[in-house]
Image (cartoon, rainbow, N blue to C red):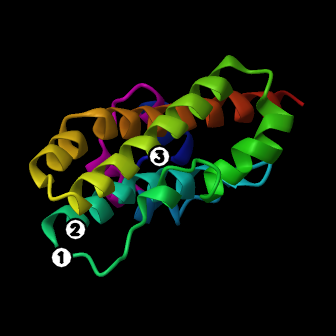
């Protein structure tokens, strides 16, 4: 069983793919170590952004029951991570370059997700699929997960030293 710290290290290096996150997340429940630092549950933030691929895939295929609105999805300050980035995250980690990388990639993630939704609503499913699977969305999703892991490790290291 992979421990939480090892899981974050692997994620930060891009060694754990999104598919293995789901199986690891269920294992994390057995670990006593918390992944919450300064009000952000890093595992939950990674999982929430990973699930967007499933949500968007269902939307593109027409099997979703959600009414997704690209004008809301494009806003990077509406999800739990975005709210944290623009408040507590800025306060406690705004001095770290990794934080600013995460902030930028997180914004790109939401823009890409909203583009997928907008393309579907304009009957351009093929282009939406390309963005979702191989394009900006796929890349920004991987980047957000990796950067969240790197930020967690940086913050954990700082707090462990104090």
Q: Quadrant of residue 111?
A: top left
Disc on the earlier residue, 3 or 1: 1
Give the residues drawn in magenta, as a range: 11-24
Q: Nearer the viewer, residue 139 or 148?
A: 139
Residue highlighted by disc 3: 110
Q: Residue at x 37, y 42 (%)?
A: 112
Q: Position of residue 55 (x, y in %)?
A: 31, 65
The residue positioned farthest toward the left in the image shown: 126
Residue 6 appears in view: no
Disc on the earlier residue, 3 or 2: 2
Where is 27 relative to 64, above or below? above
Q: Position of residue 129 (x, y in %)?
A: 16, 48
| Number of on-image labels | 3
In the drawing, does residue 35 fall left or right of residue 92?
Answer: left
Labels 1 and 2 touching (C-beta < 8 A) = yes
Disc on the earlier residue, 1 or 2: 2
Q: Secondary structure at mark 2?
A: helix
Q: Secondary structure at mark 3?
A: helix
User: Which of the numbered marks, if any, corresponds to residue 63?
Assistant: 1
Residue highlighted by disc 2: 58
Label 1 – label 2 distance at C-alpha: 5 Å
- Residue 136 is a magenta residue: no
- The local crowd at label 1, few if under 14, some if 14 to 19, many if 20 or more residues have their Cα within 10 Å, is few
Q: Quadrant of residue 93?
A: top right
């Amino acid at each position: 069983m992979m421990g939480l710290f090892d899981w974050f290290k692997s994620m930060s290096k891009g060694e754990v793919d999104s598919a293995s996150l789901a199986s690891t997340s269920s294992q994390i429940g057995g670990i006593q170590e918390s992944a919450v630092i300064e009000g952000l549950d890093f595992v939950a933030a990674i999982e929430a952004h990973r699930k967007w691929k499933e949500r968007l895939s269902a939307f593109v295929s027409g099997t979703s029951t959600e009414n997704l609105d690209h004008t809301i999805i494009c806003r990077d300050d509406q999800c739990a991570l975005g709210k944290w980035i623009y408040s507590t995250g800025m306060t406690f980690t705004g001095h770290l370059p990794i934080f600013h990388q995460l902030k930028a990639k997180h914004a790109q993630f939401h823009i890409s997700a909203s583009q997928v939704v907008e393309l579907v609503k304009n009957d351009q499913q093929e282009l939406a699929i390309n963005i979702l699977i191989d394009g900006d969305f796929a890349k920004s999703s991987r980047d957000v997960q990796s950067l969240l892991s790197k930020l967690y490790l940086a913050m954990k290291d700082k707090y462990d030293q104090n």
